Image: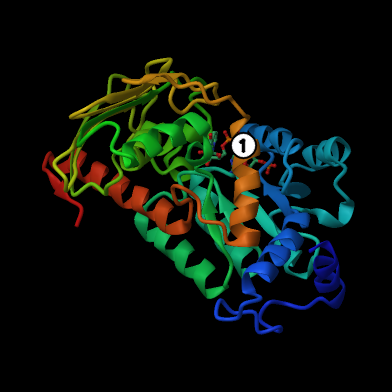
Amino acid sequence: MKNRRIFLQKAGLSALALNLTPLNPLWALNEENIMNVAEDKPLRVAIMGLGSYGTRVANAMKDCKRAKLVGVISGTPSKIEAWQKEYGIPAKNCYNYETYHQIKDNPDIDAVYVITPNGLHKEHAIGVANAGKHVICEKPMAVNAKEGKEMVDACHAARVKLLVGYRMHFEAKTQEVIKMRMNGDFGKVLFFQGLSGFVIGDPTQWRLNYELSGGGAMMDIGIYSINGARYMIGEEPIWVTAQETKNDPVKFKEGVDETIQFQFGFPGGAVASCLSTYSMNNLDKFFLNGTKGFAEMQPSTGYGPIEGRTNKGPLTNPHVTHQTTQMDEMAAIILDGKKPLVPVDGEEGLRDLVIIDAIYKAVKTGEKVGLV
Ligand code: NDP
């Protein structure tokens, strides 16, 4: 096996070149060898936007086995210098927002992780795609479904992958509950509750600036309950209703939501009742109930450890830094074509944006908005 693998590596031959199709009896043997070769190669990532979350991702990547931080894109020269020292990044892999299109001529970078404010994701992701690099983009993927669709189309046209930083899709306790639901352990699932909130500080930050945020708490953290409702129930919602409460219209200006309650209906008869807010701390809870059992998680989407229990007892899966697992799994998705338990592709990001658009429409009109 080992010899064959070395032979393939040295010869630089692909399965296609060797005609190793599933109809060929040598397929299984050689597919395994080719996968082993792929496993040796890391996904070489540049981070764009060296802010609070970019720093968290970079630190988590120190423990990655398949993903490696090799480059940066930043508008702040002092950060570039500090990151070069901290992560051993060569000058040839450092860019700013004016020069990053030149990344197309850099064979040492495979993917760019866009971790800039929401309102810039579309421009940055499309710029990266047009430079021929895979895109990993933070949530929310864009500020509305129209922009999200443009990103999906651009990445498709450029033949690069588009993944969204949905770290919870790889979190062990979350996956455990999803597998239990798939296995029928909760019976017919009929109710989900998702609560997402924290008290936002500095009123001058981009999260409270509509141009850069695209909205308020809904865009930032309400998306966890939307996405959670979908992966916990395992269906796509068919309608939404929503109501907004704004106690501080000075801090939360036009278009920037403070608190929204929203409800979904699902084709199988389940309903979801959720709340997103920028005015309550430590609000991070999921609850799922079916005809036979339940799951509750609190905290459910924070950086962890996630805590939870089901009708069968406590969830005991060990905590691993979310972004470490996420980046290793994303490397496998991009390099090996691995299929995740819950998708993290551009279409998945787009579904959440279609729902967010519908929630804002429901707030404005006071009506039930259909989603099909
Ligand atoms: P920060 O404000 O801490 O960082 C954003 C960075 O983007 C800045 O430091 C800056 O980096 C760059 N940037 C480029 N243009 C601008 C601009 N006009 N205004 C402000 N910053 C700019 O934000 P976060 O890191 O908290 O959030 C970034 C993204 O990550 C958001 O989309 C957010 O939703 C997402 N996020 C995801 C989380 C998750 O758990 N998945 C958690 C937290 C955030 P530079 O100086 O290098 O150019």
Pinpoint residue 197: horizontal percent, then vertical percent. Answer: 39, 23
Find residue 62 and report its image quarter: top right
Q: In which quarter of the image is the C terminus?
A: bottom left
Q: Give the amino acid at mark 1.
A: Gln
> Would residue 1 be found to the left or right of residue 349 on screen?
right
Decide: is 79 above or below 152: above
Decide: is 273 above or below 4: above
In this rendering, does residue 278 appear at all?
A: yes
Q: Is mark 1 within 8 Å of ligand 1?
A: yes
- Write the residue at 41% across / 44% down: 214
Pinpoint residue 266: horizontal percent, then vertical percent. Answer: 19, 44
> Would residue 57 be found to the left or right of residue 213 on screen?
right
Decide: is 309 above or below 244: above
Pinpoint residue 231: horizontal percent, then vertical percent. Answer: 36, 42
- Write the residue at 29% across / 47% down: 355
Q: Which of 217 and 195 is in front in this view?
A: 195
Q: Which of 109 and 242 is in front in this view?
A: 109
In the rendered image, which residue does mark 1 sit on? 323
Pinpoint residue 262: horizontal percent, then vertical percent. Answer: 23, 33
